C-alpha cells in the first residue's frame, strides 16, 4: 500500500481546497483496509475515507490518515434475457461505469451520467439526478466493518435510502467502508425522459430516446448548467432541496407568487433551494475567492485560493438569511470535515 506523509489534498477534493493530510493512503484491497484499521501501524491516527472528493468540504487539514478508495473491478455476476447483475469496485469512477453500461445496452443509470465521484460513495447519499435515484437500480453492497474488519452485505432495505440519504450518513456513519456495489440493470430499459429539459434537448440533438442519446442529453444539460470543478472549485449542490409543509408553502406562495415547488405526497412540497438562495439575493455573490455561482445559486464556489472555513461561514450566513426571509431551514448536502 502506498502511504505518503504530509500531503496536500488540493488535487483530491473538487472544491480545490489546499489543506494537508497527515497521511494519504491509496487503498486498493481489503488487505489495505486491514492494514489501516486492524494493525497497530496507524492506531493513534484519526481516519477518514475519501472517494473522488466531490462531496466534501475541508474546513481544516486532516491530521490523521486519509484512505483514498481505489478498489477496482467491474464484472457481470449473473444475467438473464431481461436484466444483468453487475458488481463494481467502490473505487471505480461513477461516470465511467455509466458509460460502460450504456455502451453494453444495460439501462437504468443513463440519467445519472456525469455525476462526479466514485461508485462506493454513490450509495452514501443515494445520488440522484434527472428523475432517477441510485436506489432504483441498487441490488446490494459489501462494506468493511471498521470495528471488526469483517465484510458485511447490505441489501436495499438495510440501507434506508431516502432523498440524498442512507444509513451510512445516519446511524452507521463512520462505521463502514463500502468496498463493492451490486447493480441490477435492465436489458429492456424503459426510458425516463420526462424530467427537466431531456426531451427538449433530444429534439435539439435530433435524436430519438436511447440509452446513448439520453446519456448524452443529460451530459449536455449538466455541462450547460453546472460549473466544471476543473474550472472552478465546487461540490455540486451545497444544500438539499428542503421539503416543507403544504400550508407553509401556500403562505409563501401568497407572499412570493413566483416561488416554485413540487408536491411530495399530499401534505408536503419540495422547494428548490437554488430559487430561495437566488431570491434572497445571493446569486453571484463573491467575497475574495469564495462565493455563490453566478448561474446556479445552489452551488458554492472556490475561485482559487478560498478557504473551506470561509465557505462554511458563508453557508451559515446563507442559511440564516433563508430562515429569516422564508422561515425555511436549509440542510447541507456536502459532508463537512
Ligand atoms: P467523496 O466526496 O470522496 O465522499 C463523500 C462522503 O462519502 C464522505 O463523507 C466520505 O468519507 C464518504 N465516502 C466516500 N467513499 C466511501 C466509501 N467507499 N465508504 C464509506 N464512505 C465513503 N450528487 C448527486 O447526488 N447528484 C448530482 O447531480 C450531483 N452533481 C454534482 C455535480 C458536481 C459538479 C459536483 C462537484 C458534485 C455533484 N454531486 C451530485 C455530488 C457528488 O458527486 C456525489 O455525492 C458523489 O457520489 C460523491 O462521490 P465521491 O467519491 O467524490 O465522494
Ligand atoms: N433555480 C433558481 N435559481 C438558481 C438555481 C435554480 O431559481 O440559481 C430554480 C430553477 O429555475 C429550477 C429549480 O430551481 O426551477 C431547480 O433547479 P435545477 O433544475 O438546476 O436543479 P436543482 O434543484 O438545483 C437538483 C439536484 C442536483 C441535480 C439536479 C438535476 C439537489 C440538492 N440537487 O438540483 O444534484 O443534478 O437537480 O436533477 O437535489 C447535487 O446533489 O450535488 C446535484 C447537483
Image (cartoon, helix red, strand yellow):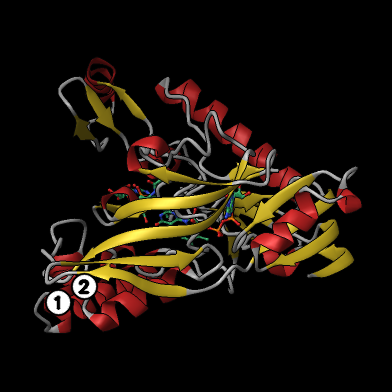
Q: Secondary structure at mark 1?
A: loop
Disc 1 marks which residue?
210
**In-front residue for pair 13/221:** 13
Tags 1 and 2 in contact by the CB under 8 Å rule? Answer: yes
C-alpha span from label 1 to label 2: 6 Å
Q: Which mark is residue 270?
A: none
**In-front residue for pair 126/299:** 126
Asked where in the image residue 278 lies, by quadrant, the reply is top left
262 left or right of 25? left
How many numbered marks, from 0 up? 2
Identified at 27% across, 35% down, the residue is 259
Q: Position of residue 227 (x, y in %)?
A: 49, 66
Q: Which mark is residue 214?
A: 2
Residue 16 seen from this side? no
Mark 2 neighbour class, 10 Å CA radius: few under 14, some 14 to 19, many 20 or more: many
Q: Position of residue 305 (x, y in %)?
A: 76, 62
Residue 26, above or below 166? below
Residue 99 seen from this side? yes
Mark 1 neighbour class, 10 Å CA radius: few under 14, some 14 to 19, many 20 or more: some
| Ligand 2 within 8 Å, label 2 CB | no
* Quadrant housing the C terminus: top right
Residue 329, above or below 32? above
Q: Position of residue 328 (x, y in %)?
A: 42, 24
Identified at 44% across, 50% down, the residue is 123
326 left or right of 61? left
Identified at 15% across, 22% down, the residue is 266
Q: Secondary structure at mark 2?
A: helix
Asked where in the image residue 268 lies, by quadrant, the reply is top left
Residue 102, above or below 330? below
Amino acid at each position: 500500500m502506498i502511504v505518503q506523509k504530509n500531503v496536500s489534498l488540493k488535487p483530491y477534493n473538487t472544491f480545490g481546497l489546499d489543506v494537508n493530510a497527515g497521511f494519504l493512503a491509496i487503498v486498493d484491497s481489503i488487505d489495505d483496509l486491514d492494514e489501516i484499521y486492524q494493525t497497530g501501524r496507524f492506531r493513534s491516527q484519526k481516519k477518514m475515507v475519501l472517494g473522488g472528493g466531490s462531496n466534501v468540504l475541508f474546513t481544516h487539514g486532516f491530521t490523521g490518515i486519509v484512505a483514498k478508495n481505489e478498489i477496482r473491478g467491474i464484472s457481470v455476476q449473473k444475467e438473464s434475457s431481461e436484466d444483468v447483475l453487475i458488481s463494481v469496485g467502490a473505487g471505480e469512477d461513477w461516470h465511467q461505469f455509466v458509460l460502460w453500461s450504456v455502451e453494453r445496452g444495460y439501462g437504468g443509470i443513463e440519467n445519472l451520467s456525469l455525476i462526479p465521484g466514485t461508485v462506493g460513495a454513490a450509495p452514501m447519499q443515494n445520488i440522484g439526478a434527472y428523475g432517477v435515484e441510485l436506489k432504483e437500480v441498487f441490488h446490494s453492497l459489501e462494506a468493511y466493518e471498521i470495528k471488526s474488519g469483517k465484510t458485511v452485505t447490505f441489501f436495499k432495505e438495510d440501507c434506508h435510502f431516502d432523498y440524498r440519504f442512507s444509513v451510512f450518513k445516519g446511524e452507521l456513519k463512520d462505521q463502514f467502508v463500502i468496498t463493492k456495489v451490486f447493480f441490477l440493470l435492465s436489458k429492456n430499459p424503459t426510458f425516463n425522459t420526462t424530467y427537466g429539459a431531456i426531451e427538449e434537448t433530444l429534439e435539439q440533438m435530433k435524436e430519438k430516446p436511447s440509452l446513448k442519446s439520453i446519456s448524452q442529453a443529460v451530459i449536455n444539460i449538466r455541462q450547460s448548467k453546472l460549473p466544471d470543478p476543473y474550472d472552478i472549485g465546487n461540490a455540486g449542490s451545497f444544500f438539499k432541496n428542503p421539503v416543507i409543509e403544504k400550508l407553509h408553502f401556500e403562505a409563501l406562495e401568497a407572499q412570493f407568487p413566483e416561488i416554485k415547488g413540487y408536491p411530495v405526497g399530499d401534505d408536503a412540497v419540495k422547494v428548490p433551494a437554488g430559487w430561495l438562495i437566488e431570491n434572497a439575493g445571493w446569486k453571484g455573490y463573491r467575497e475574495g475567492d469564495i462565493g455563490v455561482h453566478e448561474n446556479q445559486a445552489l452551488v458554492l464556489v472556490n475561485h482559487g485560493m478560498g478557504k473551506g472555513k470561509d465557505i462554511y461561514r458563508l453557508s451559515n450566513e446563507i442559511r440564516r438569511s433563508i430562515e429569516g426571509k422564508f422561515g425555511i431551514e436549509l440542510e447541507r448536502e456536502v459532508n463537512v470535515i
